[in-house]
Image: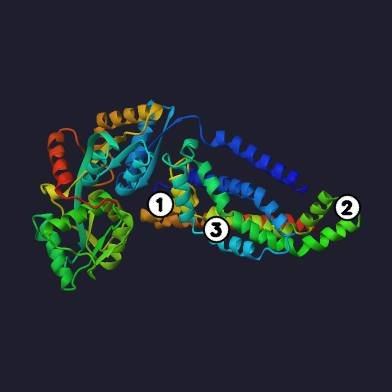
Amino acid sequence: MSLAFSEILDVTIRSLYVSGLATLLSASWSIPAAYLLSFRRRVGVLEAVVESLVGMPTVLLGLLLYMLLSSSGPLGFLKLLYTPHAIIIGQSILITPLIISTCYRALRVVAAPYLELALSMGASRPQAMMLILRESAPGVAASAVMGFSRAVGELGIAMMVGGNIKGSTMVLTTAIALGVTRGEFEAAIILGIILLALTIATAVSMKILMGVRAL
Amino acid sequence: MPSWRIIAIMVVLATVIAAGSAQMLLPNKVRVRIATTTSLYATGLLDYLAEKFEEEHPNVRLEFIAAGTGAALRYAERGDACMILAHAPSLEKQYIEKRVLENGVIIAYNYFVIVGPNSDPAEINGSSKIIEAFKRIYSAGELGEAFFISRGDLSGTHLREQEIWKRTGLNPAGMDWYRQAAAGMEQTLIIANELSAYSLTDAGTYLRLAREGRVPRLSILYANPEDPDAINIYSAYLVRGCSGDERRYATLFLKFLIENQRMIGGFGKGEYEQPLFHPAEGRLMELEDLWSRLASGMEVDNP
């Protein structure tokens, strides 16, 4: 493959951008949802459903989104198919169960006791919430990192609703898939190493960030 | 709950970032969505042609969605592509009749060849017709001396292979020596190389892989430009449902393809011993005849 440096850079930046935004977007509703969940006493069935959706096959979600966003689909008028936005939306939906369930685990431990403690000491509810989020910050951050690494590593959605268009929707995973179908294994491996390095670097930098804050 | 404020802030933040960078990512150009057979895309021919076309029309972005011909036609039917590049006459005909495709034009052709292990256990090297070669592979397969790897992905190459099998009157489906790769051409050839098996391929894809030294155990064992059953015809179509600016530029690109066939013929000439594609001009009448023959020859199950 004509694996020019500029192309690798382009694909890598797009991957970072698309999955980063998807994570941010997903966190914007998943963390509050997990926060609300952590005060409920009985969440057994809901928890089970959310946890089972963590393993949602990405091609299935991709196919559903394709049918939805296709010109003959109900949301075809939005003209989102084969744009980076479609991938962002898809990935943000994909990682929602993951962020909710991991975030919920981090919050559950501290939520109830800290809320009571804070309120009894005269804190307002927003203050109590800030305290709870601060106490569980490493866990919440870890759930976002897991969400990002699942998003950046998924292939099905990016392929189905992105279309793997060069210069527009080609991301690391779809570029790897293209390399494999073209029999260009060396190029695919290089992209794979970049992908792994990217996810590890994200996780490590987040840990450092959290560590510094905790000190 | 007081958390609504945080929710609101985060939603606003995300929306602002999304909207802001959307402009950056997608410059304000007319998108023309072209669903294409993988063999044209993977050679790099389309990127090369698109670059030339976009030089003339800088406000246009040609977006290629590479898929098997079967999938590409489904995209067209659903209105998710404005133009189609395909090489499966029998399937194309069905979609013309369904009034999905129009303004079809043959832009290029090349040949299907049979590749196989250098030792050629089925002795297809001496066959004069591709049908005869398939029969020999069948016999050798039954004797346990040969394997055949099929694409198995409803691509143009896969459909042609099925048509050839039908014409031999033999049915290899389910045989132990006949395996479906359900993969693109390159992957299928790499599998064939691993298993020392026969496979039907367009010459271009094989030549590219062979030059890169990826399929050392395979060589071209059957190639005959005179065999009408072996011709591989690439056509371009506009999708009926497509309209507006996208259609206008798709029409221009179709015209560009017709007028610049020499570029297609010259592509890859320096790197390979032979051109990967031959321009259709000059042989158009003959190719149209062959196309109709292939299109009406066999009815293929609709995917």
Residue A178's disc is 1
Say what amino acid the circle numbered 1 marks.
Leu
Q: CA distance from mark 1 to mark 3?
A: 18 Å
Can residue A159 be seen in the rendering of this structure? Answer: yes
Question: Which comes before the other along the chain, label 1 or label 3?
Answer: 1
Say what amino acid the circle numbered 3 marks.
Leu
Of all residues shown, which one is farthest toward the bottom? B143
Chain letter behind tag 1: A
Residue B173 lies, with reference to residue B160, above or below; the image says: below
Q: Which residue is mark 3?
A: A196
Say what amino acid the circle numbered 2 marks.
Ala
Residue nearest the observer in this picture, A149 or B95: B95
Residue nearest the observer in this picture, A51 or B130: A51
Can residue B214 be seen in the rendering of this structure? Answer: no
User: Element under label 1?
Assistant: helix
Q: Which residue is mark 2?
A: A123
